[in-house]
């Protein structure tokens, strides 16, 4: 079997009880517009990656309860302290201090829907 150089994380789907509220939150935190997609059975808000491809989407659905579900880690522009402020200013919740690891640093947060997030910054 041959190995490929594809990213291990292929896609992330983030449920939202209020799709418009969640769209506004993610656009503010990531400082990038999401792309509406109406090609499927329901409207989705696509999350663009840095190379212009899409890496996930928001959809109308039921978020996991606190402590359940996965944590999507996203890279946001600027400093982590700035991202923390954007999360708070847009209805989210910062739930940890900054955690440093060899490749960078991140913090945990919750979006407006209660989904668990990690906001990551690579070392430069």
Image: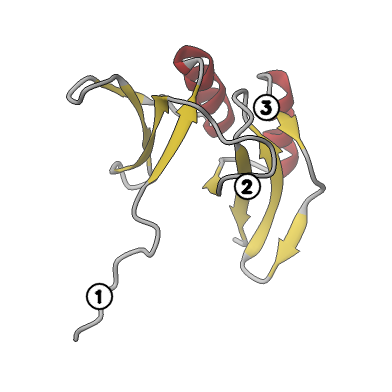
The residue tagged 2 is 118
* In the image: residue 87, left or right of residue 8: right
Query: Which quadrant is home to the C terminus?
Result: bottom right
Judged by depth in the image, the label closer to the viewer, 3 or 1, is: 1
Q: Which mark is residue 4?
A: 1
* Dot 3 or dot 2, earlier in sequence: 3
**What secondary structure is found at the residue carrying circle 2?**
strand
Contact between labelled residues 2 and 3, with CB atoms less than 8 Å apart: no
**What secondary structure is found at the residue carrying circle 1?**
loop
Quarter of the view holding residue 13: top left
Q: Position of residue 103 (x, y in %)?
A: 61, 67
Query: Which quadrant is home to the N terminus?
Result: bottom left
Quarter of the view holding residue 104: bottom right
The residue tagged 3 is 86
**What secondary structure is found at the residue carrying circle 3?**
helix
Q: Position of residue 120 (x, y in %)?
A: 61, 51
Q: How far apart are the two marked residues, 3 and 2, measured between alpha carbons?
A: 14 Å
* In the image: residue 92, left or right of residue 72: right
Residue closer to the observer: 15 or 21: 15
Residue closer to the observer: 57 or 101: 57
Q: Image height check: is 100 above or below 49?
A: below
Q: Image height check: is 18 above or below 29?
A: above
Q: Position of residue 2 (x, y in %)?
A: 20, 84
Q: Image height check: is 103 above or below 3?
A: above
Coloring scheme of the render? secondary structure
């Amino acid at each position: 079997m041959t190995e490929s150089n594809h990213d291990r994380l292929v896609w992330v789907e983030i449920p939202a009880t209020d799709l418009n509220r969640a769209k506004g939150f993610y656009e503010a935190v990531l400082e990038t517009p999401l792309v509406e997609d109406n090609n499927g059975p329901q409207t989705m808000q696509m999350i663009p990656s840095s190379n212009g491809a899409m890496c996930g989407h928001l959809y109308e659905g039921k978020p996991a309860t606190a402590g359940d579900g996965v944590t999507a880690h996203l890279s946001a522009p600027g400093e982590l302290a700035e991202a923390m402020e954007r999360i708070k200013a847009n209805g989210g919740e910062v739930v940890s201090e900054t955690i440093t690891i060899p490749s960078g640093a991140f913090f945990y947060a919750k979006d407006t829907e209660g989904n668990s997030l990690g906001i990551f910054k690579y070392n430069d």
